[in-house]
Structure formats: C-alpha cells, structure tokens
Image (tube, rainbow, N blue to C red):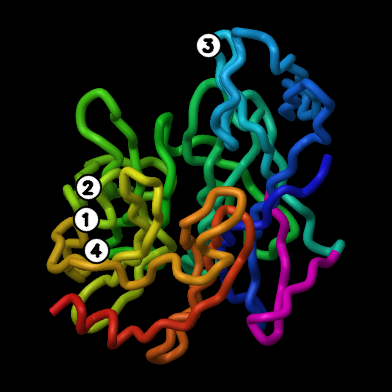
C-alpha cells in the first residue's frame, strides 16, 4: 500500500495543543494491465481485489471510484490518524495516540473526513463510514484520545458531512448532516435534533443548491458552527457542476438554528493556489476543522483532495458579507 493523499482533517484543542484527526487515503501498487482496489473483509483484514483493464465489465473512468459488474469500489481506502502541534503548523504523530481504522461490514471501504466537537469533557467524532452498503455517518466519543467508544451509525446511507454543535440549546443537541437524494431532491444541508447526542430526529432542510452559484450541485457542513452575537456562523463547502469546491457561510438564529438568517452570495474562499487547483482531484477546497482565536479563524482544509493547507480568515469580515 502507498499513501495517495493526506486530506480533510478534523481539528480540536487538547491540553494546550492543537490536535488533528487526519484522513490518510492509501491505494495499492498497481500492476500492469490491472486495476487493484483495497478493502477490509468482515474480520477487519485488508484484502486486495484485482480487475483486468480489458474486462468490458470494468468502468475505471473516475479516479476515485470504479464500477465492476454493477458493484462500486473505491480506488483508495482511508483511515484516521491523530497528530498534535504546539504552534498549529508543525504536527507530529505519537504512538501514544493510536490510529483509527474501519471495522465491520459498514466500514469495509474505510472511514473518512472526521469532524470533532467538544461537548463538556468529551470529544464527539463524526465521520463517514463507507462500504458496499452505502455511505453513512459514524460516531465515536473519547475524553483522552487513547480509548474510544463506538456508537455505530447515527445517520444511515446516503449521508455524510455531519457536525455536532458544541453546546446544547434548551437541553437539545443539534447537528448538521447531508442526506443525498439524486432522484428527487438533491445534495442539501440539513439540521437535526437530539436529546442525548446519539439518537437524532426532527430533521429540517436549511440550505439547498442554487442555480448558477458556486454551490449549484451540492453543499455540506464544515466543522461545528461558531457562536457569535449575531448567530451561529456555519462555514460550508459548495460545489458546482464542474466539481469545483468553494467555501461559503450561513448565519443561523441563536435560539432556533434551523432558521437561516443569511447566506453567502459569493464564496468566502475559492481554489486559487496551484496546490488547490491541481492534485488528485483538482479545484477543491474542503474544510471540516478550524480553531477560533478572537477574530481569527484558522481554517484547516483539504486542497485538491491531496494536501492539507491552512488559511486564516477574519470572523468579522465574513459576517460583513452576510449583512
């Protein structure tokens, strides 16, 4: 196995350091005339499937997903690694904090794109579970980043981009998520409620795609929203029909976050640098982690589905765009 991409990190603060839950995407060494894909079996053991490129039942036109005889397989398999930094720029991994790998039938294609929310003394990790059964949202909790409690799938397929608010409102938990409905509806951003943080209901759609905008094809939440005097500021990704991913912002009511007060007319950040425009899957800026320091939002993001980058945005300047 070789590392193909490092991308889409969840971010948190722990004991005076900045922590990162990094997605590591690996792929098999390819054999001449073959397409090889990795997956976990029912016992959590990695196995390799080989397909001949001459086989008419094989469609390998997409760099991320192949289809063979009607079944889809990811070309990479992802797991999560935990790193820490004193300065927010240089991150290091330690054997003290173990990596997280896919387990069981619903994570046989790996786990991806973790978001981290701190609620009281516990950290809630929401992440994408991938398998032939579809794409859903898994949840783990931890207080020390060494031992984890798994709570299974909390949003069933097809669903992803889940971020839990870092405080309750009237003893109610809130979470963003992104169900997909290609036949009727679309890839829209939703919010749901929970009394315990594990069982979710009262789902409401809060943001839909917009024709001729940067978010015309799909959109989904970034990290947990930021609480401001004007409302909850939610930074999200939006993509158009050319699969160009930019960042936008929503402003939600403090007491009723299913109520949208304002939304970005234009992107607050778009692919501009070479490493954002070219890579494993170019023209992509995708965030699911940040640290807020006064007016500064230190935004960690995946660039071109290949690298991790850092940008500093102004909270007040984003809010001005939402006037």
Mark 3 or 2 closer to N-term? Answer: 3
Provide residue 277's location: percent of width, then percent of height: 51, 61
Q: Position of residue 166 (x, y in %)?
A: 41, 66
Identify the residue at horizontal 73%, vertical 24% (top origin): 35
Does 103 appear in magenta? no
The reply to whether the C-beta atoms of the residues labelled 3 and 4 are less than 8 Å apart is: no
Kindly check if marks 1 and 2 are in contact, taking CB atoms under 8 A apart as contact.
yes
Could you tell me how far apart the alpha carbons at marks 1 and 4 are, in whole angstroms? 35 Å
Q: Do tag 2 and tag 4 residues touch (Cβ < 8 Å)?
A: no
Instruction: Quarter of the image for the C terminus: give it.
Output: bottom left
Q: CA distance from mark 1 to mark 2?
A: 8 Å
Residue 315 - label: none
Between the C-alphas of marks 2 and 4, the distance is 30 Å
SS under mark 3: loop
Locate residue 190, reporting x and y percent. Answer: 27, 47
Question: In which quarter of the view is residue 47 placed?
Answer: top right
> Does residue 123 appear anywhere in the picture?
no
For numbered disc 1, what is the local secondary structure?
Answer: loop
Q: Earlier in the sequence, mark 3 or mark 4?
A: 3
Q: Mark 1 highlights which residue?
A: 213
Q: Secondary structure at mark 2?
A: loop
Q: Are marks 1 and 4 in contact (CB under 8 Å)?
A: no
Residue at mark 3 = 70
Whether residue 90 is in magenta: the answer is yes
Reading the image, the residue beneath label 2 is 209
Q: Which residue is mark 4?
A: 170
Span colored in magenta = 80-94
Observer able to see residue 251:
yes
Cα distance between the residues tagged 3 and 4? 47 Å
């Amino acid at each position: 196995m070789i590392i193909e991409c490092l991308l889409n990190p969840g971010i948190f603060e722990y004991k005076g350091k900045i922590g990162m839950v990094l997605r590591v995407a690996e792929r098999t060494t390819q054999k001449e005339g073959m397409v090889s894909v990795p997956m976990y079996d029912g016992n959590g053991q990695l196995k390799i499937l080989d397909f001949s490129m001459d086989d008419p039942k094989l469609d390998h036109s997409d760099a991320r997903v192949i289809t063979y005889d009607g079944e889809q397989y990811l070309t990479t398999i992802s797991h999560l690694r935990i790193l820490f930094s004193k300065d927010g720029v240089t991150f290091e991994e330690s054997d003290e904090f173990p990596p997280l790998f896919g387990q069981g039938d619903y994570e046989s294609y790996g786990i991806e794109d973790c978001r981290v929310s701190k609620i009281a003394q516990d950290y809630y990790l929401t992440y994408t579970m991938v398998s032939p059964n579809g794409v859903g949202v898994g949840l783990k909790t931890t207080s020390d980043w060494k031992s984890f409690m798994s709570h299974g799938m909390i949003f069933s397929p097809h669903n992803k981009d889940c971020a839990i608010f870092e405080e309750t409102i009237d003893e109610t938990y809130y979470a963003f998520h992104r169900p997909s409905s290609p036949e009727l509806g679309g890839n829209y951003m939703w919010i749901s409620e929970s009394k315990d943080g594990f069982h979710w209901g009262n789902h409401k759609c809060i943001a839909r795609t917009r024709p001729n905008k940067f978010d015309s094809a799909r959109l989904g939440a970034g990290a947990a929203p930021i609480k401001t005097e004007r409302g909850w500021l939610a930074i999200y990704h939006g993509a158009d029909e050319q699969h160009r991913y930019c960042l936008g912002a929503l402003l939600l009511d403090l007491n009723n976050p299913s109520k949208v007060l304002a939304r970005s007319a234009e992107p607050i950040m778009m692919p501009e640098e070479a490493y954002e425009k070219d890579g494993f899957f170019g023209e992509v800026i995708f965030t699911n982690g940040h640290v807020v320091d006064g007016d500064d939002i230190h935004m960690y993001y995946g660039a071109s589905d290949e690298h991790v980058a850092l940008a500093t945005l102004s909270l007040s300047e984003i809010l001005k765009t939402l006037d």
